[in-house]
Amino acid sequence: MHKTTLEQWALLESVVEHGSFARAAEETHRSQSSVSYNLALLQERLGVALLAPEGRRAVLTPEGELLLKQVKPLLKAFTWLETRATTLRNGMRTRLDLVVDSIFPRRRLFAILRQFQQRYPQTQVRLTEVLENSGEALAHSEADVMVLTRRQDITGRGEWLMNIDFVAVAHRDHPLFTLEAPLNDEMLRPWPLIHIADQQNAALPGGEAWTFSTIDAAIDAVMYQVGYGWLPEERIQQALEKGELKVLPLSHGTRRATPLHLIVKRTLAPLDEQVETLLELFSQPPQN
């Protein structure tokens, strides 16, 4: 059997945090004598002095500081365990499956997840990023919440969320910028179009397309002058601002919009609190 209890260590932490036995007793809803007794028992069983008087305050001895530092992760883990049990008892979900198209703005995505985590720290979010219109999206179509470009192949209830702007760009040193503007299809034809797998932006008639499986790889390919391409504007904003990438002066079609839809699994009826909150966070205007 253990000589000490987590309750005793928690009382020690409270005394140190509040500076006195009286304040700790008030915060833990105990009598001052109960706090004093438990801490005296803790030190007696350990055979180590953990607290020393300093004026009107009780402060840790060097040994007490070392031991309390080591036990704090256990106290935190035990608090988490009890909170998790409360979550289960109240019928709140402990996991939420989320599928998001990889063209969704990363900064906005993680801002949403951070807000959700702050509200529901006991609910684990399982995030899967998928490529636009890919079969992988269909494989995850039973997720609780989905942000995808297409709705017709997904068995869920959803609505338009936002448009993602793709812009035609190339590296600033690409030979295309030496040609006289505006650029037409014939002028673009000799150069490879960087194509993101499963993206609907097909190659121009007769043009060569190089396909990459991720957005990041396609961006790198354009940055290294492998070719030109339509890339999500939000993901290349810094490169555009620095002038590393430049928008091509096309005669037409410089910008293309791809819609994203917010979809919820059809069998979730009525919606639980966590799903409703996540839908609300996605639907809010982005914070600058």
Image (cartoon, rainbow, N blue to C red):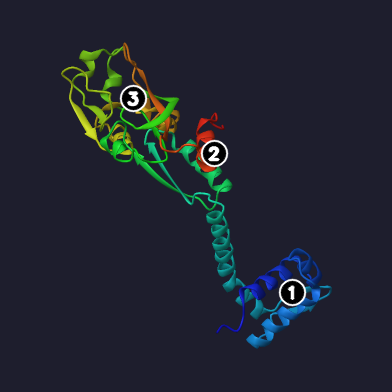
Q: Residue at x 22, y 15 (%)?
A: 187
**Could you tell which of marks 3 and 1 lies nearer the N-terminus?**
1
Taking depth in this image into account, of 214 and 189 the one nearest to the observer is 214
Find residue 165 and report its horizontal and vertical position in percent. Answer: 40, 24
Which residue is disc 2 drawn over? 277
Q: Residue at x 65, y 73 (%)?
A: 7
Q: Secondary structure at mark 2?
A: helix
Does residue 279 sit above or below 228 in this rendering?
below
Residue 104 lies left or right of residue 198; in this view the side is: right
Q: CB under 8 Å between callouts 2 and 3?
A: no
Q: Residues within 10 Å of mark 2 (few under 14, many from 20)?
A: some
Q: Amino acid at mark 2?
A: Thr
Q: CB under 8 Å between callouts 3 and 1?
A: no
Any mark on residue 105, and which?
none
Q: Residues within 10 Å of mark 1 (few under 14, many from 20)?
A: some
Distance Cα–Cα, label 3 vs label 1: 63 Å
Which residue is disc 1 drawn over? 59
